[in-house]
Image (cartoon, rainbow, N blue to C red):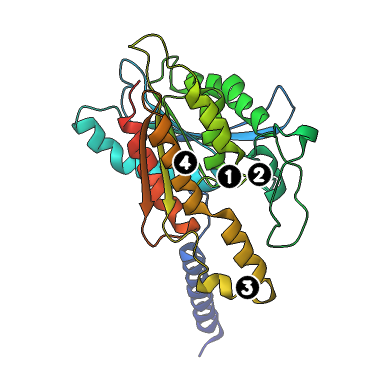
Amino acid sequence: MPLPALRSLIVLALAALIAAGTLARASEPSAAPVRIEGAVEIAFTAKAGGEAFRLLVYRPQGKAPAGGWPVLYSFDGEDSFALLTDIARTLNPLAARTGRSPVAIVAIAWPRGRASIDRRVYDMTPPTSRAGGAHVMPERPNGQPWPQLGGGDAFLALIEDEVKPLVRSLLGESTGPQTLFGHSLGGLMVLHRLATDPDSFSCYAASSPSIWVDDRQILADLERAIARPPAASADAPVPGLRVTVGGAEEEFGPQDARAGEGAEARRRWIANNAMVTNARALAALVAEKGEGHLRFSYEEYEGRTHQTSRILAALDAVQFAIDCTE
């Protein structure tokens, strides 16, 4: 083969190889953040304590109703926001077709990489009213001492003083009925807000609340709150309270038995928490003394554990927020 022809053949071959490589690179997958349509994230620093937080907000599609969107507020935004927003995106069109207002979702989260168990325990536990200021707490399954407790009131003040104004700036100065939702320690904080300032929200959804904290102090707090005289005006709104719990939350399951040397500590933890027993005690308290003070509903999710009940509770909370009226 003549040299010019050989060169031409080599050039063609190289061109084919380069083209093939380009096509291969073009077809390689690329990673990009997943975004939720209608959702925004705002990073802000609390004026009161100088702590950094994230505010996650989902706004329904379309024009806001005359009274503003109903709003579902949630703790633990890192875990709850995507779940609640997906449920809202599913239920909101049905709500609109049946003459009810779609619901907006608001969740408070710590900065990325800054969330921790210690931080959550502090922010999601009420201060104690016991002499000496020491909480009564059970042994932890890991055997470690409890971190600092009792920052819940400051966290709730953050919601009232800083988060709610931010939400109004995003959704409009008028908002519809507001519902507060939390799971586990978050459920405890829902009950604590109800006991200390029931007018903060129209409805309260407590999922598997950690009533066991501080030797069930929240039950005494709620009993005192219920004992207060009802509002003088017959037209005054009565708060709605929905409490849910997994029916299997007191069972020592196979996953707990696999804890090895820590299995016995895990057994004691589950027994002490008495999630179902305590939730039933709360339901009995409200049934006995809450008439005229609360619109109350209670449900146990048969066979559901502490982890899996959260999913059903989220579904219930969104529907509860849509149905919540002042």
Q: N-terminal of the two: label 4 or label 3?
A: 3
**Number of numbered tags placed on the structure image:** 4
Q: N-terminal of the two: label 4 or label 2?
A: 2
- Residue 294's place in the image compared with 310, above or below, is above
The one nearer the camera, 220 or 50, is 220
| Label ID, residue 120 | 2
Residue that protrudes farthest toward the bottom in the picture = 1
Kindly report which numbered mark, 3 or 2, lies closer to the viewer in this rendering.
Answer: 3
- Which amino acid lies under the numbered mark 1 shown in the image of this protein? Leu
* Residue underneath mark 1: 185
Q: N-terminal of the two: label 1 or label 3?
A: 1
* Residue underneath mark 3: 259
Kindly report which numbered mark, 4 or 2, lies closer to the viewer in this rendering.
Answer: 4
In this image, 324 relative to 53: left or right?
left
Crowd class of label 2 (few under 14; some 14 to 19; many from 20; radius 10 Å): many
Q: Do the residues labelled 1 and 3 touch (CB within 8 Å)?
A: no
Q: Residue shown at 48%/26% (left/top)?
A: 226
Horizontal and vertical percent for residue 238?
A: 38, 22
- Residue 4's place in the image compared with 246, above or below, is below
- Which amino acid lies under the numbered mark 3 shown in the image of this protein? Ala
Q: N-terminal of the two: label 2 or label 1?
A: 2
Element class at badge 2:
helix
* Residue underneath mark 4: 282
Kindly report which numbered mark, 4 or 3, lies closer to the viewer in this rendering.
Answer: 4
* Quarter of the view holding residue 262: bottom right
Q: Can residue 44 be seen in this view?
A: no
Q: Do the residues labelled 2 and 1 touch (CB within 8 Å)?
A: yes
Q: N-terminal of the two: label 3 or label 2?
A: 2
